[in-house]
Amino acid sequence: MEKWQMSCLQVEPRTPIHCGDRPTGFVASALPFVPGHIPLMALVPHVVAASGLPNKFDSFMTAQGFLEKHLRFTPFFILGAFSRKPLVPCNETDIMAEMESHLIGSRYGVAIDYGVRGAKEAHLFEIEAINPIARERSQTIFEGYMFWRAGEHDGLEIDQQGLLNGIEIGKWISDSQWGGERNKGYGCINKVGKIKKETIWQGKVNLGSKNPVICWPDDIPAPFYLKYDQNISATIEGRLKPMVGRIFDRANGFGQSSSEALIVWDVGWVSQKQLKLEINTKTAVIAD
């Protein structure tokens, strides 16, 4: 089996990014970061179209299966304007205050009644999103990590240098859109930079296992979702939440079905001891 490779990516958005969180009333709330499965899933339709695969369900499943086997991403966090460190949501009020006051904005709209070509009564909505330009006019920059390992299948290939069908994966990312509200132009990427690093933020990395493994230190808010494990629950401080999203439904199309719910500790959890974490497509899990 090929060894995993790793790079740190810094991504500049061109338009607002909305990764949906729990809606509240008429507000479509947004996460203050980009979950790790979003960049991967955003590549699927782009890879299908650019690779000349037939525009049908089986092509999308082929592309998704290949990418899930050969590609992983951590979540992507906004770099602080002054600290240049990732703003990981946690109980630190200054981090949350910086994100809410400088980086997250909202757009308003109304649902349309197509019968009269006017607004539906009592159907005002608000969409939260991460702004591409912060309120002090600085460019928003996301930082996260990408892992890849060489392999090929059904006309798709990733090599050891990080080329997907001969093109830098960063170029594929810059041509995709992250998150929701893409039909409104959200989630467009302006620039992707690649940086060589030996650790993932504060965690040491083992790239020789079946999946990338990170040794995450104790008492530091973790930048990953962690799949619930009863065996360690007494040593974890954090909030449990169901992780679920929209997926393709053969009968009704894109976004018309739901993925199986996973119970996870939300990003920002803290462990009382060092943990070895395996990075999967959606979450980290306790490594064997």
Image (cartoon, helix red, strand yellow):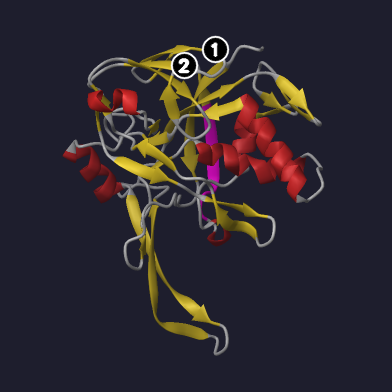
Residue 106, image x, y percentages: 36, 60
135 sits to left or right of 197: left
Kindly report the secondary structure that dominates the magenta region of the rendered protein: strand
Mark 2 highlights which residue? 213
Residue 193, image x, y percentages: 52, 29
Query: Type of residue at label 1?
Result: Ser
Residue 63, image x, y percentages: 71, 37
Residue beneath the point at 60% across and 27% down: 71
Whether the magenta-drawn stretch holds residue 264 is answered as no
- SS for callout 2: strand
Mark 1 touching mark 2, by CB under 8 A? Answer: yes
Asked whether 206 or 133 is in front, the reply is 206
Asked whether 268 or 226 is in front, the reply is 226
* The residue positioned farthest toward the front in the image shown: 230
Q: Quadrant of the N terminus?
A: top right
Q: Which residues are magenta?
A: 186-193
Task: Bin the neighbour count of mark 1 within 10 Å (Cα to Cα): few under 14, some 14-19, many 20 and up.
Answer: few
The Cα atoms of the two marked residues, 1 and 2, are separated by 7 Å
